[in-house]
Amino acid sequence: MQLVALLGSDPSARALARYRDPEMRVWLHPVPSGSVAEAVRALPVLGFAGALVFGEDGRAEAARAVARRSLDAEEQKAVDAVAVAGDATVGDHVGGRAVVEGLRRAGWDPRGARVVALGEGPAARAVVRELAAAGAEEVTFVARDAPTAEQAVPELPTGVRGRGLAAHDPALPTLLERCDALLRSEDLVAPAAARLGPHLTVVDLVPGLDGAWRRDGRAAGATAVPWADVEAHRVAAGLRAVMGGDVDAEPLLELLHDV
């Protein structure tokens, strides 16, 4: 059985401490307090296979502490999964890839998609980068003001249009009506039921968001992906990065739906 640390006091980390792998391949051990950097450096000494890191500050600290970083971790300046290789630690950022993979498994194709992100935080930026790499046609970041939204737009592949808009911009209602996917990390805009429909997929990237988008979206025939589903895929992808092999997200869902 491989020992994997849970670093950070995020609700996900607390919930996952109750996880029991039916195949006895992994034991998740919470380390909720203290320095993330010190915990990362101690992983090889203490016999851990690696760690899952939670919280924006913890992931930034882990990125500075690991011996090597993947390209995704370099770009995000954050590490959410740490693997131990001999005496060294290798950091990766799997969150964005995991969300896109989960959407694909559910039958949603990012090619040609028009994506709107409500909120410009790290979670939204990571997913938008992956969607753009996977063939999205257009991405829009929405923030409380236009300069913040514009600064959030990352460097995008050739052919992908990117822009930033303030939440009060008069063009936003039309964009929301014609977009294919809505990524939510902030409650910046209330849903307008008349503009929702079966074309739309609503994805919650953080916990605790207003449920109106999911409720009204489902009523209009849209697909709603709650935060717990997103987080289960993130955690499964993190465990794959640490342990290798396949990890099913399904057994994680029940724990995370209780958060």
Image (tube, grey):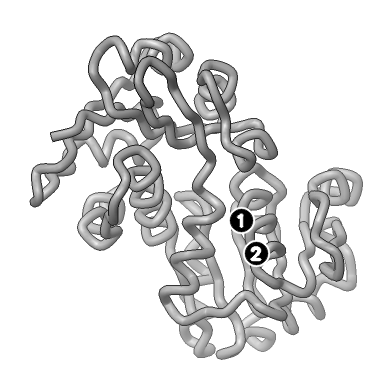
Q: Tell me the kind of residue under disc 2.
A: Leu
Q: Where's residue 3, x and y in %? A: 21, 29
> In which quadrant of the rendered view does residue 81 lie?
top left
Residue at 51 percent of width and 48 percent of height: 95
> In which quadrant of the rendered view does residue 30 lie?
top left
Crowding near the residue tagged with mark 1, few <14, some 14–19, many ≥20 C-alpha atoms within 10 Å: many
Q: Name the residue under label 2.
A: 131
Q: In this view, does 239 lie above or below 5?
A: below
Q: Tell me the kind of residue under disc 1.
A: Val
Q: Is residue 44 above or below residue 258?
A: above
Residue at 9 percent of width and 51 percent of height: 22
Q: In this view, does 223 lie above or below 228?
A: below
In front: 90, or 125? 90
Horizontal relation, residue 237 to residue 94: left or right: left
Q: Where's residue 190, x and y in %? A: 65, 67
Alpha carbons under labels 2 and 1: distance apart: 6 Å
Q: Where's residue 208, x and y in %? A: 46, 50
Element under disc 1: helix
Q: Mark 1 points at which residue?
A: 127
> In which quadrant of the rendered view does residue 56 lie?
top right
Task: Tell me the number on the disc at residue 89.
Answer: none
Element under disc 2: helix
Q: Where's residue 144, x and y in %? A: 79, 49
Image marks 2 and 1: residues in contact by CB distance under 8 Å: yes
Horizontal relation, residue 52 to residue 19: left or right: right
Residue at 71 percent of width and 48 percent of height: 120
Crowding near the residue tagged with mark 2, few <14, some 14–19, many ≥20 C-alpha atoms within 10 Å: many
Horizontal relation, residue 128 to residue 91: left or right: right
Residue at 66 percent of width and 34 percent of height: 74
